[in-house]
Each structure stands twice: as C-alpha cells, then as structure tokens.
Amino acid sequence: MPMGRALLCLMLAAGPATAQQAGTGEAPAELPAPPGVPPLAAPPSLPNGTIAAPDTALSDRAPVLTLDLDLLYLSSAWGLRAQARLEAEGDIVADENERLTRLLSTEESQLTEQRATLPAAEFRRLAESFDLRATGIRRERAQAVQDLNGWAEADRAAFFRAALPVMGQVMSDRGAVAVLDRRTVFVSLDAIDVTQQLITTLDQRIGDGAGVVPLPDPDAPLTEEMVGSGQAEDSGQAGDAVPDQVE
C-alpha cells in the first residue's frame, strides 16, 4: 500500500472545519490573500546535472565532492528499512482510523434516529457525550500520526549523524575540503559525485540502523466498548445538532 495513505491520517484526524460543512463533501474555503499583497510566485527551477569528466584522475583526487542527500538516505540499507517500517506502521494507523470512523459514523446515525423519540434534555446529554468522545479520538489519532512522523524525522537525523564520520573519511581519502549537495550545484563533473560510493560504504559500516531510534510506544488503542460505552465526563457545551464525526 502506498506511503501516501499514512499522510491521509492527518486529514482524517482533523475532522470537518465546521458543523455546517460536515457531511456535505465541501472543502473549507481557502483564506484570501491580504488586500494589496500579490501572491508569492514560486522561484524558477534551475537546471543542474553532471557531465563526464575529461580527466579520469579526478575520480581519485578533487577539492570538492558532491552527493545526492535524498538518494543517499533512500537507497541505503538504513533508509530502505526505515521506509518499509514507516509504511507498515502508517497502514496500522490508517486502519485504526478507518475502524473508528465507521464506529462513530454508526453511533451518530443511531443518535440521529433517536432524536425524534427522546426528550430534548436527554438527547442533548447524549449528543454532548458523543461530541466529547469524537473530539478525544480525533486528538488521539492526530497524536499517533505526529508521533510516527516524528520518529521518521528522528531516524533520518540519526542516519546522517552516523554517516558523517564515514563522509569525512571519504572526503579525506579523496583530498577534498568540502562535500556539497548535488541539487544545489548548477553543473559538476560526474567523477566528483560520491553518492554510490557512500551508499556502499555506509551499508558496510553502519548497516540498516535497526533499533537505533525506537518506534513510538502509543497508548493502548480504544476498543469498541470504550468508544461506544457513553462514559465520558461532561465538560463544555454542545449545540442542538449532532456533533461532527471523525472524518
């Protein structure tokens, strides 16, 4: 399943923008730009690339080296392990979000059906209780996504910390004084790119980094009994309408 599914967790956890928009399928209107301020234009992308080195001696000695930081991470054993784990954990979060969404949607429909037969005070009490549970679940699911994203960032940072001494050794061996991200260089000789060399060396020296940054330990997931029990402290006010469900 594509990694993009994990990103949908944030959209699901956020819920609808207003009660009026809930269930209509309408996206919240974008805020207009302040009067008199033109929209920011994206800077033009500059071409960059490599050309063949005319002198093969540059493959051994060069004052400046280049590498592709993203390719270095994503193609390394460490990065491949992290991507696979992130996708698997993201699927778990997304599946739990979908389960809770269906559960709350069913409860909301049942509550709507009861509205015509319940006294107004009783219906308001049930609606407020539902609203509290739905809000708490949204917050919990958003936190689960935030924790997973934080783990991914921490794992990537740990990779580059572990890779730095190896990069320094390669730089020293090649007689270089600097290593630049290839994406920031307009054009360079392919002989000074050390991305593939570093991937091979890092796989041998630091491995896949399993366990270096532990995965977040989330609280036990809510069960259907906990969500549907109706036990929640009454705090805050809810409107007459049935509160929004998790979306």
Image (cartoon, grey):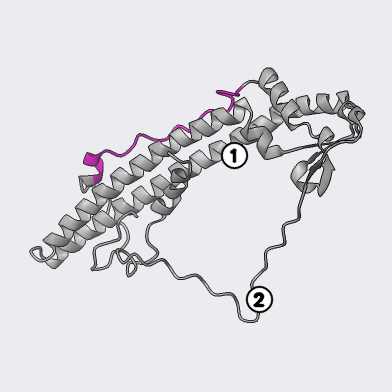
Badge 1: few (under 14), some or many (20 or more) residues near its Cα, within 10 Å? few
Kind of residue at badge 1 = Glu
Which label was assigned to residue 38? 2
Across and down, in percent, residue 128 comes to 25, 59
Which label was assigned to residue 95? none
Residue 7 lies in the magenta stretch: no
Residue 223 lies in the magenta stretch: yes
Query: Front-most of 209 and 117?
Result: 209
Please tell me which residue is depicted at 55% across the width and 23% down the height of the picture: 211
Query: Front-most of 111 and 3?
Result: 3
Please tell me which residue is depicted at 83% across the width and 33% down the height of the picture: 191
Please tell me which residue is depicted at 44% across the width and 34% down the height of the picture: 89
Disc 2 to disc 1, how far (Cα)? 34 Å
Taken as a whole, is the magenta stretch helix, strand or loop?
Answer: loop
Mark 1 highlights which residue? Answer: 153
Please tell me which residue is depicted at 88% across the width and 26% down the height of the picture: 60
> In which quarter of the view is residue 151 placed?
top right
* Earlier-in-chain disc, 2 versus 1: 2
**Residue 180 shown left or right of residue 127 in the figure:** right
Across and down, in percent, residue 117 comes to 7, 64
Kind of residue at badge 2 = Pro
